[in-house]
Image (cartoon, grey):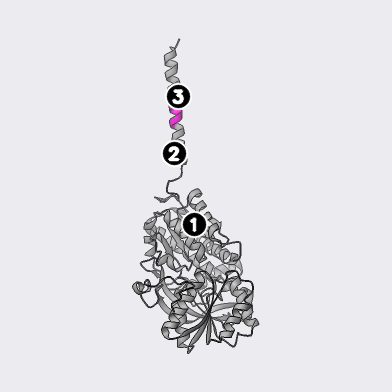
Amino acid sequence: MIPASWTGRRRVARLLLLVAALALAVSACAPDEGGGGGGDSAGGTVKVGFISPVTGFVAALGTDMRRGWEMYWQQNGAKVGDVTVQTVFEDDTGDPEVALTKARRLVEQEQVQLVAGPILANTAYAVAGYVAGRGLPTLQMTGADDLTQRKYDPHVLRVGYTSSQSNFPAGKWAYDQGHRTAVTICPDYAFGWESCGGFVSAFVDAGGTIKRQVWHPLGTQDFSTYVSQARQANPDVVFVGSAGGPDAILFYKAWTGFGLKDKIPLVGNCCFADQVFLREVGDEALGLQSFTYWVEGRDSEVVQRFVQAYEQQHNEIPSLYAAGAFMMAQVTAEALKKTGGKIEGEEFINAARQVSLSDSLYGALTFDDTNNVVGPVYQTRIAKRDDGTLWSVVENTFPEVSQFGTEGKEAFLQHPVFSRDYTGQ
């Protein structure tokens, strides 16, 4: 017969073994405290959260973004070295509060190690602040100026141009063409203020006068009031700092409806007369001029290979949003090669900043010391391809344009960020 004391000891031992096993299981399943994993992913899986609006008033933009991101991995494989890249997609609907909620879910529940996107300036500010605050890297293609200026954070890299950057050459060019007065029409939020700021500051600095600045709400359905204001001012030229999509389409329909197409020269920003616009407007867009960094008709093997592949898959020419997301994926892959598959916050962004491309979808590309693109800006014109398809072609190239314009970083950052109340006048 086994003594009762032995039986008790055996029960206690079994209980202790069970508790230890449960503790090990819980530890193995627990998420990292920092949210987002980080650390050494070599030989494993890198998890990326991708945020874009695929429903709501800018759904066309977000859908093109997702297509561009997916196309890069389809063409190049989902592995970089020994690392597999897995993407978790989220829809921010174009709303900053929704975007922030989705970013939290990606970081805290999905445990992503990197966040890419979103696109609108207000959603980007919300997402970048939260993600960088968690110590995670984020790649942006939005134009929100201060992400790489006064609110610079070493965890944020922009694979695109600031809202104002491509419009500095536009303002100087307009003055050089003999235009001495201008009206600007821009959406009344960060992207619009900054787009107008780039044009206005350069135009005024060259000697021009801004007769009126017209602001309209994002998602405006009727532009007749705003177009009427521009017509009454009777300027030499009108600059449109559009967010693209429905806003650009509805504005231009009002513009042509007032009979202004051949009366007042119109100059657009990066997002005005892009493919989302051309698909809807058609031949009425012929001859329109814009200043941008993505030109689907540019004479470049890199560009035309991408355009051909995208058309074959989606039966339409890629927009700036598709090209920009493709570029984000490319820079992600190049940075992973440099880090050996590791994503560790600021160190990953440092690696991404070292990426230099002699010819990319944007052209020759490098990054400055606050993680923003330095590259060419193109003056473009809407023309017909040989098969009759509308696209943009290059009229003039302005190389190595900085986010700080011609002032230089130190002088430029003395000014406040462009806003409704300050556009460089």
Residue 355 location in percent, x, y? Answer: 39, 65
Q: Based on the picture, tell me whether residue 113 belongs to the magenta stretch.
A: no
The residue positioned farthest toward the top in the image shown? 1
Of marks 1 and 2, the one in the foreground: 2
The relative height of residue 28 versus residue 48 in the rendered view (above or below) is: above
Which type of secondary structure does the marked residue at label 3 adopt? Answer: helix
The relative height of residue 205 versus residue 307 in the rendered view (above or below) is: below
| Residue at 42% over, 73% down | 375
Contact between marks 1 and 2 (CB within 8 A): the answer is: no
Looking at the rendering, the stretch of residues picked out in magenta corresponds to 14-20
Structural crowding at the residue carrying mark 1, measured as other residues with C-alpha within 10 Å and reported as few (<14), some (14–19) or many (≥20): some
Q: Quadrant of the C terminus?
A: bottom left
Q: In which quarter of the image is residue 185?
A: bottom right
Amino acid carrying label 2: it is Ser
Q: Distance between the residues labelled 1 and 2?
A: 30 Å
Res. 14 mark: 3
Q: Based on the picture, tell me whether residue 16 belongs to the magenta stretch.
A: yes
